[in-house]
Amino acid sequence: MFNTEKIPEKAIIYGVFYGLAFILMAMGLYFSPSNAHLFEGYLGFIKHPCLIDFDGLQQAGHFGTAFFNAGVQLIVVLLVYKWTNTEISCVQIAAAMMIVGFSFYGKDLANVWWPVIGVFAHTIMLKQPLKTCTALAWFSTALSPVFSSVAFNKDVLVPGSPVAILSGAVMGILCGVI
């Protein structure tokens, strides 16, 4: 039916994933009462301490925020893959899908970067190309709620203060390096 011989496999994979990301973001817009509610909810999602009982579908205010977050996270993963020139394989697909799944439970734009930076810093110290560790970097984000727990938990430091955010960032980077 379709002649896919002329389309590189990499382009098909990126097209499918970008399509999924935009579908998730469109679902976020659909489930959101308004754009203002969506972005207000998203800001609340980012500032949540992400403790073990966090469920983005229930606690973010509405379904829209969680779906929008999942789409944004998938786009971020794809951009990092593109930036590092990573060859897409089954491991990278698994890492991307893990990010999407756990975006409903606390992974957001504020906390995923710190373990990724830690893994990239470790890779640079070993003088290896970044493309060799992108899947590992995204798998390391299993520990990304450490940042949110330190930066926005009222029981640790003053939530959102510069000291709390810096402490959370250091903890997240250490998690990635280790």
Image (spheres, rainbow, N blue to C red):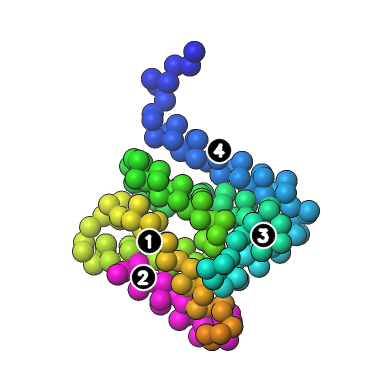
Front of the two marks 2 and 3: 3
Residue holding disc 3: 58
Q: Are marks 3 and 4 in contact (CB under 8 Å)?
A: no
Residue at the spot 51% in from the left edge and 50% down from the top edge: 100
The span from disc 4 to disc 2 (Cα, nearest Å) is 32 Å
Q: Residue 175: which disc?
A: 2
Evaluate whether residue 113 shows in this view. no
Residue at the spot 53% in from the left edge and 78% down from the top edge: 151
Q: Which amino acid does label 4 sit on?
A: Gly
Residue holding disc 1: 140
Pinpoint residue 2: horizontal percent, then vertical percent.
48, 16
Above or below: residue 140 compared with residue 13: below
Farthest top residue in view: 1
Q: Are marks 1 and 2 in contact (CB under 8 Å)?
A: yes
SS for callout 3 = helix
Earlier in the chain: of badge 3 and badge 4, it is 4
Q: Is the magenta stretch mostly helix, strand or loop?
A: helix
For the residue pair 22 and 49, the one nearer the viewer reads as: 49
Earlier in the chain: of badge 3 and badge 1, it is 3
